Image (spheres, helix red, strand yellow):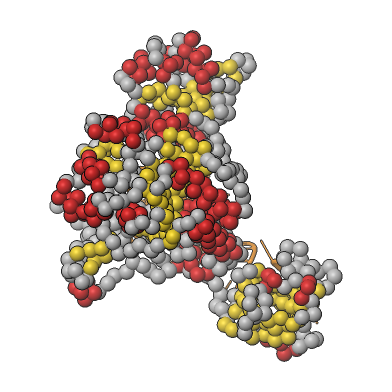
Amino acid sequence: MIPNAYRSLHCNAVRPEHIGQTVTLCGWVNSARDHGGVIFIDLRDREGLTQVVFRPEENAALAEQSHTLRDEDVIQVIGKVAARLTGTENSKLGTGEVEIVATELKVLNKSEVLPFHLDREMSNEDLRMKYRYLDLRRERMNRNIRTRHKITTAARNYLDATGFIEVETPILSNPTPEGARDFLVPARLSPGKFFALPQAPQQYKQLLMVAGLERYFQIARCFRDEDLRADRQPEFTQIDIEASFIVQDDIIQLVEGLLASMFKAGQGVDIPASFQRITYQHAMDVYGSDKPDTRYGLEIVDMADVFATSGFKIFRTILEGGGVVRAINAKGFAGITTGQMIRLNELAIQAGMKVKQLAFIKVERNAEGVLEYKSPLWKFFGEDEQKALIAKLGVEENDIVFFYAGTWDDACNILGKVRLEIASMQKLTEGSTALNFLWVVDFPLLAYSPEDQSWVAVHHPFTRPKAEDVPLLDAGEYGKVRAEAYDVVLNGYELGGGSIRIHESDLQAKMFSVLGVTPEEQELKFSHILEAFKFGAPPHGGLALGLDRIAMLVSGEESIREVIAFPKNNKACDLMTDSPTNVDFKSLRELYVQSTWKEKKKEDAEAPAA
RNA sequence: GGAGCGGUAGCUCAAUUGGUUAGAGCGCCAGCCUGUCACGUUGGAGGUUGCGGGUUCAAGUCCCGUCCGUUCCGCCA
């Protein structure tokens, strides 16, 4: 650090080499140990701790003053660096071999007693949020915020070094027709009209490609007005990337290098130079998820060949009807408790299971030492089927196998969730430091939405269909068209996703038509991009990484709130500033906006007339 | 919109089947203490058990409602 009027060193920088020197430190009183005579103060700044000692025999007035110091007072201390007395060194502190013998003390600001301890974990989330500036003073939060800075800087440096140019795109932009709910901002100068805060700089970055920038990035704040989760905030940050004259492999290699630089900077670890790639189809078949956690097996196994001609009518009928029969072998989980079993079934029902109970086979040795296959359906299977099943799933003593038979969609969804829950119950990832990066590729381009009774973009409407699947698109077989889209996944978290884009005006217009965007709407909402694509738009594509999630995983946290300085709670409120807030009628009138919100009236419990 | 978990002193938590004056540790305040580092030690203050209602001789505990926090489902191209 550069010495200034307040200090000559950071607290953590005081070392034996400074012994004999007079130094000036400042910071917070981390703890005061008053022995009646000698007094010790642990002085803390953002870099660490130094012990300051006040001795009455050396300076009585100063020692007297030091008695008044309380935790979190902000002070400045001038003193001489001295070796600690033999036997009183503190090996827990970086500065534990030395101490400052104070010669001057200046109280820069007294502190009231804090509403909570800084040196202990707390569970009261609203109190943490109300006093977030104190929460951030805690060592863990300080570290998280600084780790985030490190990985952000690493990302900037990496992208700069690879020829990317950082460009800011508008925060005040237009609502998007598809996707998440927008935050709206009334436009005073255009009465009755609204801006929307961007869900992503998607269209702007594509237009920057048309502009010939070739390589763009942005540490971009994005906004989505949807319900929150531990890993979802209404405003969040993406590392947004777009490049021209590239193919999927180029983006993948770029992002692998980018993530390597970020994890190196944040965690000091070397991650694999390239990640495993699996198709969307494979991910869904084997893990029941498009963001699989591959730190453990518990793979979903297709049992069609075992039960194709089964005497067990339910399975055979479902298979004949085009459905699937799939199973998960939870190794060593035969000891599952009744409560856990209930929980699994509840989860499966919530995920769409049509029956009340997951079919299972529990393999345990009985009192006579004979292996028993405890199951409501074991007896319906023929001997060959039983053998085939055991072989295919590798069933052994103390395993429990869960089955689901039904549609492919339901099987993926239900068994995918069952898989995650079993892993959690078996604590399969506890203490794991594994970083299982992977790419999921070949996403479907379109999905049918029964709700909207129309086809919707799985990724977004600018995603390019795979060249070999364009005939399927032309033939109207929308469900079979794959996209040039890819997600990067770490330990079950989607870190980011992207695609190669459509750069031809006519193909883009065709996509809009398939998605049910009428020519009038296209003209109204997308004429800028359709027109831009007519003026020499280069082939291009990109990706966006969720910076908050990456920071969370690098810091070993379980919520992105722990790596965001001032996050919102799960009702999207900031308890520190009490935001959002009411505005007065005059402010609204200026914006030509009127609220339809009515405070809930207290309903007097009126008993119905007898 | 739905479900689970939680709300007791400033903080972290306890309180058996509904049963004495709701406790402990830390913190705080005051005293003592000259080598501690989670200093020690003596004493003290501190509670509308989130809020409202109900059942009961008796409610932190049971019931209903409500608010707050949190997790998940729906939602999140």
Residue A230 seen in the current view: no
> Which residue lies at the image location 44% right of the left edge and 53% below the top edge?
A546
Q: x, y percentage for residue A259?
A: 52, 50
Please tell me which residue lies in front, A533 or A138.
A533
Left or right of A67? Residue B9 is left
Residue A285 sits above or below residue A457 on the image: above
Residue A134 sits above or below residue A393 on the image: below
Which residue, as the protein is rendered here, is positioned at the far bottom?
A61
Q: Quadrant of the N terminus of chain A?
A: bottom right
Left or right of A430? Residue A411 is left
Residue A71 sits above or below residue A491 on the image: below
Please tell me which residue lies in front, A26 or A241.
A241
Left or right of A606? Residue A560 is right
> Which residue lies at the image location 80% right of the left edge and 86% below the top edge?
A57
Q: x, y percentage for residue A161?
A: 52, 57
> Which residue lies at the image location 81% right of the left edge and 74% below the top edge?
A83
> Which residue lies at the image location 43% right of the left edge and 16% below the top edge?
A305
Please tell me which residue lies in front, A496 or A471.
A471
Q: How many marks?
A: 0
Left or right of A599? Residue A206 is right
Residue A92 seen in the current view: yes
Q: x, y percentage for residue B6?
A: 47, 53
Which residue, as the protein is rendered here, is positioned at the far right?
A86
Q: x, y percentage for residue A13?
A: 69, 71
Please tell me which residue lies in front, A331 or A474.
A474
Residue A369 sits above or below residue A153 on the image: above
- Quarter-of-image position of residue A482: top left
